[in-house]
Amino acid sequence: MNLFDTHTHLNDKPFINDIDNVVNKCLDNGIKKMVVVGFDISSSLRAIDLAYRFPNIIYAAVGIHPTECNGINEEDLNRLANMLDEPCVVALGEIGLDYHWDTTTPKLQKEIFIKQIKLAKQKKKPIIIHNREATKDTYDILKKEDISSIGGIMHSYSSSVEMASEFIKLNMMISISGVVTFKNNHKTKEVVKKIDLDHLLIETDCPYLTPEPYRGKTNYPNYTYYVAKEIANQKNIAIDEVINTTYSNACKLFKIE
């Protein structure tokens, strides 16, 4: 198997002291490549460290999560710009809007979001979007900023089929996480059924969003298999087709040979 987990947080606390075992388990279970995604400056630096520690297996994405926008200044954005020049960094993310957690203001989130989009376009890197309860504003900003020139990922997509189609028109990929395996998540299952496989990616968002049959426990990149399996079930196609196509989609987006 050649599975590509496009969104992990191996830079997060549950993995820090056990990273070698986690990566070896991934390799043993067909996970050939992973992107470790930053959510602030320090986690972005850890993502880069992991990418250099496990070359051609782990790649890094760097960015400021919308709930981490407080106190972000031009110096932080300059540090991000320098990180984007590292060869192991394949995307800017995760960035976006989150109106669920009351940690900052929509105005500040939009400001930092737009600045990071402009930085990604300058550096010609795709973006990884976090969107929670902010679909319209997220879409409007991506369209206004003409994101189609670099494209990117709607991470752990949870909106409608109709909006998925609109994001795809902006050159965004739709990434499916373990929530698609949840029995009552009809919305994501419908997205998987209706959206062409050429526009889909798979991810775990580990240690969060653990798929069935491990829901409620720590998530790991090797559980990407269960995401692929559910997509295959919903589309009534072979799991190998899901695995191979999503792997190819990811490599193309991230410009990985």
Image (cartoon, rainbow, N blue to C red):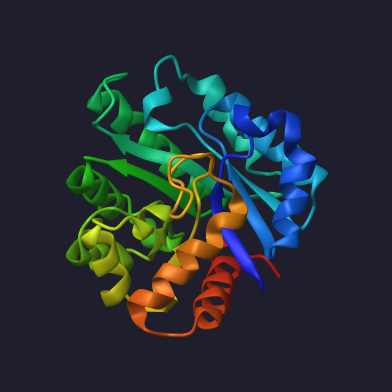
- Residue at 54% from the left image edge and 59% from the top image edge: 224
Indicate left or right for 141 with 255 as reference.
left
In the visual, does 25 lie left or right of 241? right
Quadrant in the picture for residue 248 = bottom right
Closer to us: 230 or 257: 230
Residue 131 location, quadrant: top left
Kindly give the residue lying farthest to the front in the view shown: 213
Where residue 44 appears, x then y in whole percent?
61, 33
Closer to the camera, 190 or 105? 190
What residue appears at the point 66 percent right and 34 percent down from the top-left corner? Answer: 15
89 is higher (above) or lower (below) than 248: above
Asked whether, in this view, residue 103 is left or right of residue 64, the answer is: left
Q: Quadrant of the C terminus?
A: bottom right
Which residue is depicted at the point 37% across and 56% down?
147
Q: Which of 95 and 114 is in front in this view?
A: 95
The N terminus: image quadrant = bottom right
Give how far across and how far down residue 76 sits, in percent.
Answer: 55, 23
